[in-house]
Image (cartoon, rainbow, N blue to C red):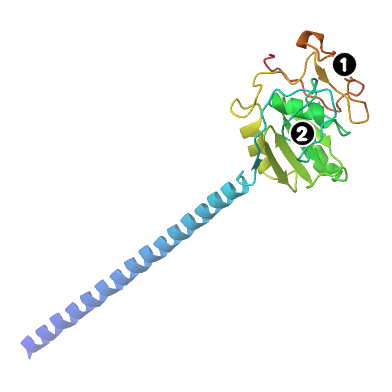
Amino acid sequence: MTKEKAQARREHLARMRAEQQRKERRAAFLMWGVGGLVILALVGVVGYYIVHDRSQKSLADVKTYDYKGSEHTFDKVTYSETPPVGGKHNYLWQQCGVYDKPIHNEHGVHALEHGAVWITYQPNLPAAEVAKLKTVASSDYMLLSPYPGLPGKIVLSSWNHQLTVNSADDPRIAEYIKKYKNNATYTPEFGAACDGENSVQTTADDPLPPTPSAQPSPSAMPSAAPSAQPSAAPAPSPSAS
């Protein structure tokens, strides 16, 4: 009986050890399983926010065009796009800054040719939204003005490129400016000033410069005679050409 009891005790201990080992394996499996699920969840959340952030800042909706530069005229121009993104334009360019009234397309397009980003907004855009846009447009090579008949709430235009957004908080605004403002790849007259002797600060309430009897040479072009100051004009320091 003693041998039988000893054998039974050994078998009982072996079963206990085996059961303990099974419990430990289950605990380890649960720990690693739960940990793995947590890691996967974290990776998924981080991945979602990265993809979401990139999609929010994507410039895939930017429309592109193919206008050549250096086509100047003193005549009124009918443009295909609203606002225009290129084409013939006035010999004088709009001085970059913030305007509370609409400006002439012909002057605005010339500023685009020099590398400006022109932000236009519907005249009924809430004042809080306009204030945010004024902050955005307070740097060099930026134009801001209301635009009657605008096809969207806010439109960003640069030479041969245009993006429509619905809010001044849209993160694509900053991305657009970073990519297209005064960029040598997209600017026909890269390095040209956005202010200076042949710039104007007029609004659409003022007449375009009169057409001269003969096309002027650059030295004979009329100097700017501004009749309206930008409401918050920046102090750009471009390299004039």
Q: Quadrant of residue 200?
A: top right
How many numbered marks appear? 2
Work out which residue is located at the far front of the displayed protein and give it: 213
Q: Amino acid at mark 2?
A: Thr
Residue 239, given in percent of the width and then of the height, sits at: 67, 15
Location of the C terminus (image quadrant): top right
Q: Residue at x 75, y 41 (%)?
A: 155
Q: Between 23 and 193, which is closer to the camera in this rendering?
A: 193
Q: Amino acid at mark 1?
A: Pro
Work out which residue is located at the far top of the displayed protein and give it: 219
Side of 73 relative to 37 (left or right): right
Q: Which mark is residue 212?
A: 1
Q: Helix, strand, or loop for circle 1?
A: loop
Residue 7, given in percent of the width and then of the height, sits at: 10, 84
Q: Between 131 and 142, which is closer to the camera in this rendering?
A: 142
**Front position among marks 1 and 2:** 1
> On screen, 46 above or below 158?
below
**Quick one: label 2, few (<14), some, or many (20+) residues within 10 Å?**
few
Location of the N terminus (image quadrant): bottom left
